[in-house]
Amino acid sequence: MPVLIVLLTYPALSQDFKVTLLGTGNPRPTIHRFGPSILVQAGKENLLFDCGRGATMRLNQLKVEQIDGLFLTHLHSDHIVGIPDLWLTGWEMGRQVPLRVWGPQGTRQMMAHLAEAYSFDIHIRRDVDQHLSPRGVKVEATDIDQGVVYQHGDLKVTAFTVEHGLVQPAFGYRIDYGRHSVVLSGDTRYSENLIRFAQGTDVLIHEVIDPEAYSAFVNSYTPEEKARVVGHHTTPEDAGKVFTKVAPKLAVYSHIVPPEVPDVVPHTRKTYAGPLEVGEDLMSIEIGERVRVTATTR
Ligand SMILES: [Zn+2]
Ligand SMILES: [Zn+2]
């Protein structure tokens, strides 16, 4: 009965593909938008993309105790500051296998330095007091280039370079699962390479900066420095152009600058008429024959 097997397999695959925005903010702390982090669940696997402030708290809200891999878009602190929590708390909660991390050049070195920074705690919990798994606190870190960086069964993760000013390389990711896919922009300004890699995707999750709201935002930066920051990110009008060229079933904003919601939708509508959501922490997107958005109450 091979036909029957195919019919049963594909719907099951589709329903098992879910993306949850754990943090939709940026460096500035705000209780409503934790640091950048996105969970992709495909079948039995939980893959995390970036690990900003509070990512482990959000995983706990979703009752996800362990992840199968962490992928970093770039090494700006807002995207990585939650790693010690994820790594060491996950170990304390029973992880028996090394934490696997993929990221741009410098990732291996950073993870080695973290092991040094936390050596006291690691020694106490591993060798002296709780005798936690020596294997569970290990890290397997890989510095990546553009291309397929992870493949397991029907799940494939492809990294592609984006444009984030002087932060090079910076990556976006495309995650394919069976016949469906999601693309995460990472931090970037308008990127033709992203448009190329995102062709045919179901869902495109993209960062955005509101230049007017950001220039009015009070921080220590001069107007020139603020202009440089804007130049490293994507305006709503440019994001709309990207969405129009990719034509996903759903476009979603995450990594929203400034964090207190600027009204980015009207500006996006100048260049894009398709489906659009402004992301919120714990918003989930189920990707199958249809794309379905659900928001979890915090
Ligand atoms: Zn960022
Ligand atoms: Zn950045």
Image (tube, rainbow, N blue to C red):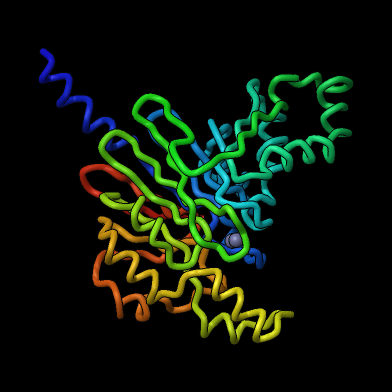
Residue that lies at the very extreme toward the top in this rendered image: 1
Q: Relative to 140, is 64 on the left or the right?
A: left
- The x and y percentages for residue 21 are 47, 52
Q: Quadrant of ligand 1?
A: bottom right
Q: Is residue 192 above or below residue 238?
A: above
Total of numbered circles in the picture?
Answer: 0
Residue at the (61%, 38%) spot, across then down: 143
Q: Relative to 149, is 11 on the left or the right?
A: left
Residue at the (41%, 66%) spot, across then down: 278
- The x and y percentages for residue 130 are 81, 22
Q: Relative to 21, is 274 on the left or the right?
A: left
Q: Is residue 180 above or below residue 257?
A: above
Q: Is residue 69 above or below residue 98?
A: below
- The x and y percentages for residue 234 are 47, 70
Image quadrant in which you'd find residue 115: top right
- The x and y percentages for residue 132 are 76, 21
Residue 7 visible? The answer is yes
> Of 109 and 240, which appears nearest the observer?
109
Residue at the (45%, 40%) spot, across then down: 147
> Of 116 and 282, which appears nearest the observer?
116
> Of 105 and 176, which appears nearest the observer?
105
Residue at the (65%, 20%) spot, across then down: 96
Residue 40 visible? The answer is no
For the N terminus, which image quadrant?
A: top left
Image quadrant in which you'd find residue 23: bottom right
